[in-house]
Image (tube, rainbow, N blue to C red):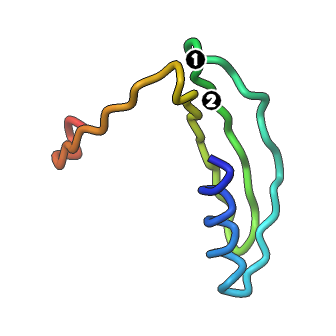
Amino acid sequence: MKLLLCLFLLTCSARAQQWRLVSSSKAEPLSPGTFYVVKQIAGPTKAEIRIVMFDEKQCELHVVANSDPRTA
């Protein structure tokens, strides 16, 4: 997860735009081994990043593609 955030920050900084972390919520448990965090960032515009972290030893993740935005 840290790698994903680092890549995001590197991509943003490569464009010479200044992004800064405004706030970060505490990690809230969703289920055993799963946590949810919300981060507010500001720069050229404001953004909210919602992150769900999984413990690979306790969770199994399945990705399902749903191309219909009405039922996604």
Residue at the image point whose x is 62% and y is 46% from the top: 1
Dot 2 surroundings within 10 Å: few (below 14), some, or many (20 or more)? some
Q: Nearer the viewer, residue 42 or 62?
A: 62
Question: For the view shown, which residue lies furthest in the left direction?
Answer: 68
- Amino acid under label 1? Leu
Mark 2 residue element:
strand
Return the mark for residue 15: none
Check the image and name the residue furthest to the top. 32
Give the residue at mark 1.
30
Q: Position of residue 8 (x, y in %)?
A: 62, 65
Direction front: furthest residue: 57
Q: Is residue 38 above or below residue 32?
A: below
Q: Are marks 2 and 1 in contact (CB under 8 Å)?
A: yes
Q: Quadrant of residue 33?
A: top right
Compared with 61, 45 (above or below) is below
Kindly identify the residue that appears in the image at 73 percent across and 27 percent down: 27
Mark 1 nearby-residue class (10 Å; few <14, some 14–19, many ≥20): few
Q: Amino acid at mark 2?
A: Tyr
Residue 35, x across and y down, in percent? 62, 26
Q: Going by the image, does 41 lie left or right of 22?
A: left
Give the distance between the C-alpha atoms of the residues marked 2 and 1, in whole angstroms. 7 Å
Mark positioned earlier in the residue sequence (2 or 1):
1
Q: Which residue is mark 2?
A: 36
Toward which corner of the image does residue 64 lie, by quadrant?
top left
